[in-house]
């Protein structure tokens, strides 16, 4: 005969009633302990959770959501799970939401606005208490869907100037302009811009870079922009293409560090002195960029802090409070190293 205890449901799932019996308390106390431990004594809460762990009980969040009108879920849409920038941002979000009992439901749009819209429709079916989206450039249908859902939302990585639309990030344009001004200060004149994965943030960096060069009287940069997904290997290829088209180029801004690192490795392979023959700079300041030889100049972006602050802002909105500001500018840091 099996030693397994009989279950009171057809699925064999441990019920709240069984936990209450094992803990020697009522079902309402069990419910309160899992919703808010402060509603029961610490001793009783510990006894209930010990009994639940022994039985393998998992609270039914769907039932709790119906009872409380809260799902304790937050929908998060990011462009990529393989990009360190967004992985670090997710870590920041989780550090704030998890202690408050919230779980992230994460989806990846692969930089496609139509896919973002499709994903958001699906995520809203789970009745999340709030939404975190990457960027401020969305399809009109996406914005309409957000409005009609009546769910609080915060946009990350960029800044929205429209009151009532909440955002946490920094100026992508200013980040690009900072690199341009640095090149100008160092005396470079034949300057290039290389970009891939042409999402709105990449284009904004390029726009800021271009405007700053023109303001300095150097005219528009030599540009090489391709739609392919960024990689170190692609950076090497694009460096070759830039120098083939403009052999006298003396400085190049790459829209991200993956491309810039690939360009640096290609220069080393070809015997091109950096920065003696050509200066290089990237964007995002990935961990490896400070470790290359020579060390890569880059714009450090506060993606982890953006995740944390966006989650804090969303918690305020979900609690029915109005944040101190509808936009939070966390800025960036220009890390000048040996490549420029």
Image (tube, rainbow, N blue to C red):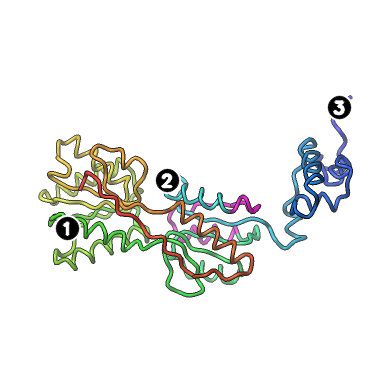
In this figure, which residue is indicated by the disc labeled 1? Answer: 185
Identify the magenta region. 97-123
- In depth, the one of 262 and 179 nearer the eye is 179
List the single residue furthest toward the front: 42
Task: Tell me whether the residue at label 2 lies in contact with that at label 1, contact meaning CB atoms closer than 8 angstroms.
Answer: no
- In depth, the one of 217 and 255 nearer the eye is 217
- In depth, the one of 101 and 139 nearer the eye is 101
Give the alpha-carbon distance from disc 1 to disc 3, as whole Å: 78 Å
Q: Which mark is residue 3?
A: 3
Query: SS class of the residue under badge 3?
Result: loop
| Disc with the residue nearer the chain's start (2 vs 3) | 3
- In depth, the one of 25 and 132 nearer the eye is 25
| Disc with the residue nearer the chain's start (2 vs 1) | 2
What residue appears at the point 54 percent right and 63 percent down from the top-left corner?
313
Horizontal side of residue 148 vs 70, given as left or right: left
Horizontal side of residue 123 vs 250, given as left or right: right
In this figure, which residue is indicated by the disc labeled 2? Answer: 84
Query: SS class of the residue under badge 1?
Result: helix
175 up-or-down from 37: above or below: below
Give the alpha-carbon distance from disc 2 to disc 3, as whole Å: 48 Å
């Amino acid at each position: 005969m099996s030693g397994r205890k009989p279950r009171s449901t057809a699925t064999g799932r441990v019920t709240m009633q069984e936990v209450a019996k094992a803990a020697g308390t009522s079902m309402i106390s069990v419910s309160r302990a899992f919703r808010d431990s402060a509603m029961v004594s610490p001793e009783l809460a510990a006894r209930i959770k010990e009994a639940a762990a022994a039985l393998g009980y998992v609270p039914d969040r769907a039932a709790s959501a119906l009872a409380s009108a809260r799902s304790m879920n937050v929908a998060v849409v990011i462009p990529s799970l393989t990009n360190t920038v967004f992985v670090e941002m997710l870590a920041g979000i989780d550090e704030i939401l998890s202690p408050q009992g919230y779980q992230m439901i994460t989806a990846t749009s692969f930089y496609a606005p139509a896919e973002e819209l499709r994903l958001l429709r699906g995520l809203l079916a789970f009745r999340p208490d709030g939404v975190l989206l990457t960027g401020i450039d969305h399809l009109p249908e996406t914005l309409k869907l957000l409005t009609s859902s009546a769910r609080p939302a915060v946009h990350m990585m960029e800044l929205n100037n429209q009151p009532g639309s909440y955002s946490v990030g920094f100026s992508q344009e200013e980040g690009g302009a900072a690199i341009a001004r640095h090149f100008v200060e160092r005396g470079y004149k034949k300057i290039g811009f290389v970009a891939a994965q042409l999402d709105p943030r990449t284009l904004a960096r390029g726009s800021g870079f271009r405007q700053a060069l023109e303001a300095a009287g150097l005219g528009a940069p030599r540009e090489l922009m391709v739609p392919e997904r960024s990689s170190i290997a692609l950076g090497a290829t694009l460096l070759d293409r830039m120098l083939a088209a403009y052999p006298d180029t003396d400085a190049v801004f790459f829209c991200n560090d993956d491309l810039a690192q690939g360009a640096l490795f290609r220069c080393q392979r070809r015997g091109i002195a950096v920065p003696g023959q050509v200066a290089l700079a990237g964007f995002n300041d990935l961990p490896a960029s400070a470790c290359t030889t020579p060390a890569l100049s880059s714009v450090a972006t506060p993606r982890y802090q953006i995740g944390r602050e966006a989650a804090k802002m969303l918690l305020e909105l979900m609690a029915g409070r109005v944040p101190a500001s509808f936009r939070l500018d966390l800025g960036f840091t220009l890390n000048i190293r040996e490549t420029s």
